[in-house]
Image: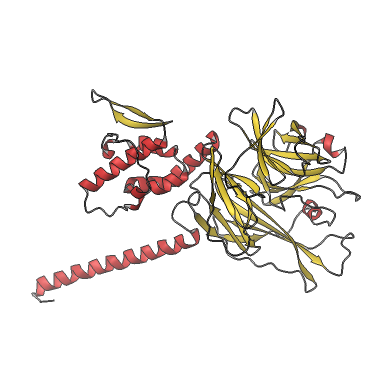
Amino acid sequence: MLYLYDKGPNGNCGFHCGRTLTHTFSFLRHQKKKFSRENPKSHLSLSFMKTLPSSLDLTFPDMATIPMDIVNDIFLRLPAKTLVRCRALSKPCYDLIDDPDFISSHLHRVLQTGDHLMILLRGALRIYSVDLDSLDSVYDVEHPMKRGGPTEVFGSCNGLIGLSNSPTDLAVFNPSTRQIHRLPPSSIDLPDGSSNRGYVFYGLGYDSVSDDYKVVRMVQFKRDSEDELGCTFPYEVKVFSLKKNSWKRIESASSSIQLLFYFYYHLLYRRGYGVLAGNSLHWVLPRRPGLIAFNLIVRFDLALEEFSIVRFPEAVANGNVDIQMDIGVLDGCLCLMCNYDQEYVDVWMMKEYNVRSSWTKAFTVQKPKSMKSIAYMRPLIYSKDRDKVLLEINNTKLVWFDLESKKMSTLRIKDCPSSYSAELVVSSLVLGCRGDLNNIKLREEQRAKEAEESKMMQNSRKRDDFLSKGFKLVL
């Protein structure tokens, strides 16, 4: 529900309730046309008006009479894609939407309400998106990293997604605003001539302590001459800071990270994409059957930039060692999925972060008769009434799982690819609307240079005018 500032019949100020976004667009259209009539020489872009749908003829007060706190309240309720277009309305709207405080408030509201959620579908070669509240159409996500081969998505955070074409060709991208920040290339330094690159693990997260977005890249090296079962392998860990726009090598790590590179550890379908919870990224390390090892989760603290271990629930750690395991995040909590013979899956949630005793079995999903197996399952989000949970199953379908009846209902997504991996993405303005952050500093420096040159030209004209008047010269 949207509330628009209006005046009643007696001239008193009040609120007009808009039931749909169409009312907001009508309001914006009316003010845009009125502004254009009263300011024929204005250079405001008209392209915004072409994007607005036809709607009712509503009469609204002059834009200048609307307090900015009311405009702010309206804009906070709109999705990021709409706000990008709203920047063309006026200079005050442009400044408001680009304001860091507004961007932060908009993100906070979206995270609190769960509004404007998108499901990102990673197909074989392309990336698609669909609105969770409206599954009518699937949209192709166009991005500058796109090329002939597939582009991997290694997680989402506050409306940003991580993109990778190769370990040295990475970016963070906002699909709502279509703004991208390409990470400066960081080479992979082989420890010696006999080594080659093995596996690469990624993670994207937000560090609330430093108010910074970070990308973690872990590379495992392999030596052809070594016995893969007999020893650990060399590794390299680097962390990218968006705020600093630079990479940092993690020179030392505890014994926990060394466990990650034992050959008998492997990661499941997430292919090494870190799971964000508790200001940390996580990778699951399920043991490989037939070898001696412990089930555990490796944690990378984004603030301290240190590794540590998160222990499994005692009931799981001391039980069947051949359980297939994966991790995810649900309702802001780290969760663990224990898959038993592809017949049923227990979902555990860590209610209090990094407190082992807080692990709680949330629910169990039994394989329905219509399904051959549950090879892979991951919870994504609770429904707003919290009676259901959205599950991704076998990389082929999304289902609502009723927590009481234990029944599944498949989401019918039109034009959906046959095989995909799903990721929830919120609609946010993170990264702003101004383009690649790599170029912002250059543009600001260019503007400062142009402003200085303009100032020098003005001073030169003043000096010439003074000379021409003082000495009666004809210039």
The answer to which image quadrant residue 338 occupies is top right
Name the spot of residue 188 as percent of width and height, x first: 69, 67
Task: Tell me the residue at 62%/38% (across/down).
Answer: 411
Vertical relation: 337 (above or below) 84 = above
Classify residue 459 as left or right of residue 367. left
Q: How many marks?
A: 0
Task: Tell me the residue at 36%/40% (across/down).
Answer: 25
Out of 428 and 231, give the one closest to the viewer. 428
Name the spot of residue 464 as percent of width and height, x first: 17, 72
Residue lying at the far bottom in this picture: please name it. 474
Task: Tell me the residue at 70%/51% (across/down).
Answer: 306
Quadrant of the snapshot with the C terminus: bottom left
Residue lying at the far top in this picture: please name it. 10
Name the spot of residue 358 as percent of width and height, x first: 74, 32
Residue 88 in sight: no
Quadrant of the snapshot with the N terminus: top left
Name the spot of residue 413 as percent of width and height, x first: 59, 42
Classify residue 49 as left or right of residue 438. left
Display coloring: secondary structure
